[in-house]
Image (spheres, rainbow, N blue to C red):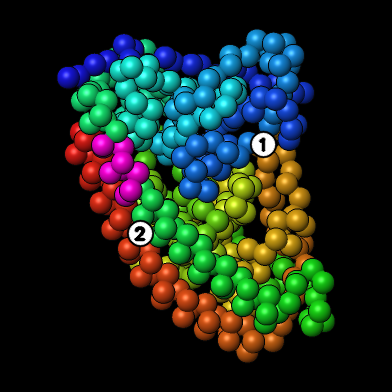
Amino acid sequence: MRKKLSGICKFYSGTGFPLKYQGKTHGKLPFYKVGDITNNVMQGNTNLKLCNNYISDVEAEEIGGTIIPPNTVVFAKIGEALRLNRRAITTVKCLIDNNVMGIAPIESEVSLKYLYYFMCNLKMELLAESTTVPSVRKSKLEELEIDLPDLQEQHNIEKILDGASALIQLRKIQLEQYEKLIKSRFVEMFGDITLNPFKWKKECLQSHIDMITGYPFDSNKYSIEGIKICGGLIIMPNCIKWEECKYWESGDGYEQFFLDADDIVLALDRPWISEGLKIGMVHSSDLPALLIQRTARIRGKDMEQKFLLYLLKDEAFKRQCTVTGSLVPHISNKDINNYEVIVPPLELQRRFATFVGQVEKLKVTAKKSLRETQKFFDSLVQSYFG
């Protein structure tokens, strides 16, 4: 049996969130923004647990806020975040901002997790209006149809998908443990870079790097194939999600923005998410690729690239760089160039790089397993929801 979402779900729109109400880390009602959905998904949370803003009942009334019930599937409905197709589930009464939409199931018709997996399978960008800023209308979603077996069969499907999803999370945890191992080795070899217990020489980073920022490629002219574009939307704290990248038809005229193997790339625009900076290293298998604006490419002049990468991944860089700009927080080139870094002997840096290379081989195997598990999960979802 197929039914329209409008007949089996309740739709919720978000609420405008004035700046004067933002920034409270405690309160009765969580106020979820697009970034909160991202943070939770990146942490592997199906249910919303992390939130950066809270308000009181009185404040919710003052802004005319719509209270979203528990067990509502929420997702970005506008902008670039829409293309990332991230979904999460509310667990308490809350509010969502007006860049987010919520869909709650009528539980006599459809189970929560069945609806959640159906929404995960939707490619939201394919439903978006063709405008400069992509957006999805409520009316379009209401008209979508879903296959509805009986509730018992829905629960059986959930259990299968939950099991595959749990395997994916285990693979991700394995990769996180490898990353922690590298960071522990860094501290063992070089010490806390703020306290500098080994008394390494300290100098401004600009003396040791070559850095450029990317070209402002027009998003309306992206190609379906060609040369990969690297930017803040695909750079994560511990990886670059090339499978989600856009393409540029030709590199002619953009030679200075081509990336090389072992280049470090750093998102300058909205760089902070719960796990850390959006920073990564380019591998030869990722090429050819071009650098887009609001992203920095960093090459060491007299520093080992893998040492430099983990120097910048250290919490000290996050603490000491100033996030400027009231509407669009970002790191400036000046912040990076003026950052004081330790300068241990190059031979020690190379020893660390060798260790990183050994762990990277293990990560390659783990990433392959993750890709295969993800592919298996995607095929399951596709078989159930088409």
Task: State the mark number for residue 310.
Answer: none
Q: State whether residue 76 appears in this view.
A: no
Q: Amino acid at mark 1?
A: Asn
In x, y percent, where is residue 172? 44, 58
| Disc 1 to disc 2, C-alpha distance | 30 Å
Q: Is residue 284 magenta?
A: no
Principal SS element in the magenta part? helix
Residue 299 falls left or right of residue 381: right
Q: Nearer the viewer, residue 380 or 71?
A: 71
- Structural crowding at the residue carrying mark 1, measured as other residues with C-alpha within 10 Å and reported as few (<14), some (14–19) or many (≥20): some
Which residue is located at x 26 percent, y 37 percent?
Answer: 157
In x, y percent, where is residue 339? 75, 63
Q: Amino acid at mark 2?
A: Leu
Which residue is located at x 56 percent, y 43 percent?
Answer: 39
Task: State the mark number for residue 370.
Answer: 2
In x, y percent, where is residue 49? 58, 38
Q: Residue furthest left?
A: 1
Which residue is located at x 32 percent, y 31 percent?
Answer: 114
Range of residues picked out in magenta: 156-164
Q: Secondary structure at mark 1?
A: loop
Disc 1 target residue: 52
**Above or below for 274 versus 172:** above
Q: State whether residue 30 appears in this view.
A: yes
In x, y percent, where is residue 65? 63, 14
Confirm or deny contact between disc 1 and disc 2 (CB under 8 A).
Answer: no
- Structural crowding at the residue carrying mark 2, measured as other residues with C-alpha within 10 Å and reported as few (<14), some (14–19) or many (≥20): many
Comes first in the chain, label 1 or label 2: 1
**Above or below for 117 versus 313:** above
